[in-house]
């Protein structure tokens, strides 16, 4: 009770409380949703890059041009998904002829490694921004019979 016998009412405080509660819950939820979308976009990009790099390597006339074409195809696939600024590593392995991937019945495996940084996260801990490491691989078998040029 106040002096004079009148009580102070709580009218209008619910609007303020609901507004603050909404802001406190909405901002983290928005960040989580944006982070999930960013990681998913990166995963799609890395998967497409592995597939494109494998095809480009297999269609190249030799291993040297195959590596250059695989890297170019992987970069283009990342750019198509809007993540061209991601770091990129392309590893190519061949079986059973590791010295010449375009020989006989080789099986070419292309592995793409990349990273997606989480949105709106500052470098507060001194290193790089927090993120997810992504990788994908694609295997392309070469047929026994090949066109001679």
Image (cartoon, grey):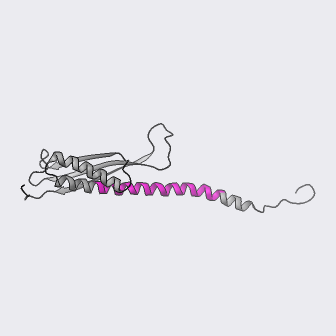
Q: Quadrant of the C terminus?
A: bottom left
Res. 23 image quadrant? bottom right
Give the vertical position of 123 relative to 38 (above or below).
above
Q: Quadrant of the N terminus?
A: bottom right
Where residue 15 sits in the image (x, y, percent)?
A: 71, 62
Q: Is residue 148 left or right of residue 12?
A: left
- The residue at the point 10 percent across, 55 percent down is 105
* Magenta-drawn stretch, dominant element (helix, strand or loop): helix
Give the vertical position of 12 relative to 103 (above or below).
below
Where residue 70 sits in the image (x, y, percent)?
A: 23, 50
Where residue 95 sits in the image (x, y, percent)?
A: 15, 50
Q: Is residue 58 left or right of residue 125?
A: left
Res. 138 image quadrant? bottom left
- The residue at the point 19 percent across, 56 percent down is 140
Camera-side residue of 88 and 5: 88
Report the number of discs.
Answer: 0
Residue ranking furthest to the right: 4
Where residue 49 sits in the image (x, y, percent)?
A: 29, 54
Camera-side residue of 75 and 120: 75
Res. 22 image quadrant? bottom right
Residue ranking furthest to the top: 126
Q: Is residue 83 left or right of residue 9?
A: left
- The residue at the point 86 percent across, 60 percent down is 7
- The residue at the point 53 percent across, 57 percent down is 30
Magenta segment boundaries in residue numbering: 20-49
Q: Is residue 97 magenta?
A: no
């Amino acid at each position: 009770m106040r002096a004079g016998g009148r009580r102070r009412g709580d009218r209008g405080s619910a609007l303020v409380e609901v507004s603050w509660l909404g802001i406190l819950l909405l901002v983290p939820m928005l960040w989580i949703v944006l982070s999930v979308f960013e990681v998913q976009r990166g995963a799609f990009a890395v998967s497409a890059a592995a597939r494109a790099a494998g095809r480009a390597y297999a269609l190249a006339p030799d291993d040297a041009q195959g590596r250059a074409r695989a890297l170019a195809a992987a970069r283009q696939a990342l750019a198509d998904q809007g993540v061209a600024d991601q770091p990129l590593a392309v590893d190519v392995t061949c079986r059973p002829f590791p010295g010449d991937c375009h020989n006989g019945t080789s099986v070419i495996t292309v592995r793409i490694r990349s990273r997606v940084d989480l949105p709106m996260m500052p470098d507060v801990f001194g290193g790089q921004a927090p993120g997810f490491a992504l990788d994908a691989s694609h295997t392309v078998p070469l047929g026994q019979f090949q066109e001679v040029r």
